[in-house]
Structures are given as structure tokens and as C-alpha cells.
Image: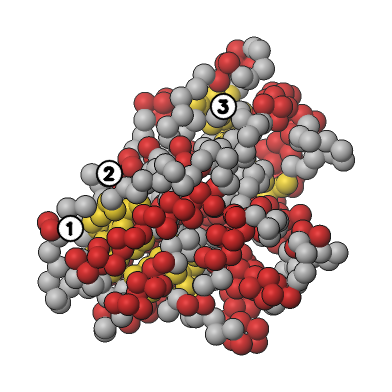
Amino acid sequence: MALAAESYSLNEHHVAVLPSPGMGHIIPLLEFAKRLVVHHGFRVSFLNITTEASTAQTDLLHSPSLPSGLHVIDLPPADVSSLVNDEMLVVHRLGVIVEESLRCLKSVLIQLGKPKALIIDVFCTQGFDVGKQLSIPVYSFFTPSAAFCAFTLYHPTMDREVEGEFIDLPEPVQVPGCSPVRTEDLLDQIRDRKNDEYRYYFGHVSRLCEASGIFLNTWEDFEPVPLKAIRENPFYQKILTPPIYPIGPLIKEHDPLTKADAECLAWLDQQPPDSVLFIVPGSGGTLTAAQLTEFAWGLERSQQRFIWVVRKPTDASASATFFNVGGDVNDPKAYLPEGFVERTRGVGLVVRSWASQVAFLRHRSTGGFLSHCGWNSSLESMTCGIPMIAWPLYAEQRANATMLAEEAGVAVKAVKSKGQTVIGREEIERVVRLLMEGEEGKVMRSKAKKLQESAARALESGGSSWESLTRVAKQWKGL
């Protein structure tokens, strides 16, 4: 941990940030930490849970380009070999890893000189207990959307009042002050209340109101309805919801480019503006073998230009690469339809496993983004003004896809035919053509460009997200 090497003077503005494992959680909290250092004059200790850390997580947090006031503190790895196995669902496994890794949290914060505040990820609620013991205010950084935050704050009430499974409710869930959530859009972790994953998940999210404040990676213009609801609806006032601070969109600003990235960007330079569909299943997502085959045929039939970040298929779990991001090696020719790479040469590129997402989305030739609709990827797409094909895989992605398609109007959802287990090639061809060459795609692109401008205004000095973070920073400096 090398804590002895860190020295903090008493007059320094020092806070600690604690993310849970997983790139979808690490990235936004790291960007948050950078903003505190660069724009608000804080010194930040970024507490890194190293147990079962992915290659991508380790590389990102040990990059030489981090600002000098941001110190990554590697927590000692915990031995979880007898506590986890490959059959465990993601949140259950994550919960065990975090629980074991944070046994040292109190001593670490004492050695760091008791920071003025501790900002924790939603799955690191052990921080509330340690914060109380050390009289350190603890804030929650809620990585999904404001709409999902509203649902999460309502979840304990549902848990008390609903008998049986939420998935069997006859009507959509009426979240106070927000759009109803259809039962088919409920996240996987709450579909079976009898399993260990639900217990771990609910144990963490039910503590959200213990926070001194909740940071949200969104902005006022993007999610006005849920933000207004959380602030003003009597339900949220009754449960003593902490102050909320929309401070986004915080996305990964810079990615080191690999040789493969550079080659792809050079190819993009030769393509017409807005003509290339960028396809990524997300940092922890994979497709089944049958779905991958249908997808390849549908993409080929669409005759649209593309860059496809492809991963080896698995029939085990849609979140199969969650704990191994950046660590898989594969040969796409081994599992793509025979001749696909050769037939689409010149029209598209197949990239193995990992790519610098923001660099591709920012390129002038990129005109669409097929995404799992994780919240980070959704924010990156909007920040770059790129409309989407929604392809949710797990977690809260189905609800995000519905919001992006039906409320924001910047995405089209690919849907399964009745009785089918995969989305067919005809449907894939349809949505790709619709987004890339149809009139509906042009309307979505225009809306995405307006959100791009709105996001930039929110983050600049004097913008809504800038002011939101500035208010909290002033409070901390006054402690």
C-alpha cells in the first residue's frame, strides 16, 4: 500500500474515493477524482480494491498520466479462494470480494490522516460504518442513471410491501414522480428475491439514504423528471433522501491508443462522415454463439460500414467478462460465420476484445453506436452526439435502453420475434439500416447532437454540473 510515503499537511483539502471493482464503476469515480484534483484543488486518495482486479483496471489505475494530486492506494488483496466460485452471480461475487477487501478500511483511513470526506461506490457501504466510527462524512457516488437512483430509493418500500416476486407484478412499477418501470425492464439482481445475489444487492442499495449526499453521473437537461422527483416528490422527502448532486456527464476523457486502435482510426479517416456503425457489447458483456452468428449475418446483410469489437461467445452469462476485462485473447475467425471477415473486408473492421471507445465515438465518420446501454457507454454516446442501437445484456441496461429510446429519442431497440431465443438477422438488418440511412436515424442523430451541446454546457465553468460539484467542494473546504 505504501501509505507511509504519503504525507498530508493539516491544511490540505484531502478526500478519499472508494470504487467497487468493475470498469463501469472504476471509470466514473476516477474521472470524478480527477475533477476534484484538477478543477477544485483537492488531494484525492483513490482506494483500489485489488482482489481479482481485471487487467484493464490495473492498467488504468497505474497509468503515468494521472494528475499529481491523485494517489492510487492499492488495498491488500484478500484471499477469497474459499469464498467465491465460477458459479456465483456477479453481484454476489462482487459483494464477497468487497466485504473481504475492506476489512482494512478503518486502519487505511487513519493512516491517511482521516480525509475530510469519503466518497463510496454503491457496493461499498461498509464505508458508512467506518465513517461513523471515524466521524468522516460519507457520500455515495451512484454510477447508474438518476431514473435508476429514484427506483433504488423506492426499492426498500417495494421490498416491504410486495409479496412474491417483482417480476410477477401485473402492472409496471410506479416509481414516485417518474416514468413507470415495466417488469421486463427490471434488473436481473431483483428478479429472484430468494437468492444470495438479491440479498447482497439489497443489503447495499437499501443503505443509500445513510449518505451525506448522493453524486449522480448525469446532468439537469438529460434527466429533468427523475431529478425533480427526487428533490420535490413527498415520498423522497418522507424517507429523508440526502441532497443529490448531478455532476455529469463524467466519461473517460483519454485512452492510450494501441496499434490496433491507430489502424482502425486511420481506416475511419477514409470513410464518409456519419457513415460507420461502432459496435461494442460493453466492458463486461458477451453474446451467445447463436446470437453472435445471427448478428454477423444481419450486419453483413445491412451493407453498412462498421467497426465491431467482438468477443468470444459464451452461453454461460451475458456478464461473463466482468472480472476479466482486457484479459481475454481470441481469434474472431474461429467463431464468426465462415468467410464473414473476407466478405466484409473494406466495408467493416473486426477488432478483438477491446478498443478505445471514446476515440472511436468522437471520430467524424462514426454515425451510430450499437451498445449494451450501460450508463457509462450511454453517456459517452450522448457526449459525442452519437445515436444508438440499444442492445441491453444485464444489470439495469434494459431500463436504460427504454429511457434512451422512448424518452430521450436517441436510440432504437432491437427486439426478438415472439418465441425466439435470439434477435434474428432480419431484425438486426432492419435496425442497422434504420439508424444509419433512414429518416428516423436522422431525427435521432439530431437529438443526440443537441444533447452533446447540452452536456458540454453543463460541465463548463458556470454550468449546472460544474456548480453542483463546486457547492460540495466549498462545504468540504469549510470542514
- Nearest to the observer: residue 449 or residue 166: 166
- Nearest to the observer: residue 155 or residue 223: 155
**Of the image marks 3 and 1, the number of the one nearer the N terminus:** 1
Label 2 residue SS: loop
**Of the image marks 2 and 3, the number of the one nearer the N terminus:** 2
**Of the image marks 1 and 2, the number of the one nearer the N terminus:** 1
Report, in whole angstroms, how far the alpha carbon at label 3 lies from the one at label 1.
Answer: 40 Å
Q: Residue at x 77, y 58 (%)?
A: 167
Residue highlighted by disc 3:
312
- Nearest to the observer: residue 446 or residue 70: 70
Q: Residue at x 38, y 43 (%)?
A: 53
Classify mark 2: residues with Cα within 10 Å, few (<14), some (14-19) or many (20+): few
- Tag in front: 2 or 3: 3
- Nearest to the observer: residue 396 or residue 247: 396
Q: Residue at x 47, y 73 (%)?
A: 214
The disc labelled 1 sits on which kind of residue? Answer: Leu
- Tag in front: 1 or 2: 1
Classify mark 1: residues with Cα within 10 Å, few (<14), some (14-19) or many (20+): few
Residue highlighted by disc 1:
3
Based on the displayed image, in which of its 4 quarters is residue 116 positioned?
bottom left
The disc labelled 2 sits on which kind of residue? Answer: Ser
Query: Percent x, y for residue 162?
Result: 75, 71
Classify mark 3: residues with Cα within 10 Å, few (<14), some (14-19) or many (20+): many
Q: Is residue 35 above or below residue 308?
A: below
Q: Residue at x 39, y 55 (%)?
A: 100
Report, in whole angstroms, how far the alpha carbon at label 2 lies from the one at label 3.
Answer: 27 Å
Query: Percent x, y for residue 186?
Result: 70, 58
Residue highlighted by disc 2:
63
Q: Is residue 201 left or right of residue 191?
A: left
Is residue 187 visible in this depiction of the protein?
Answer: no
Query: Pointers 1 and 2 in contact (CB under 8 A)?
Result: no
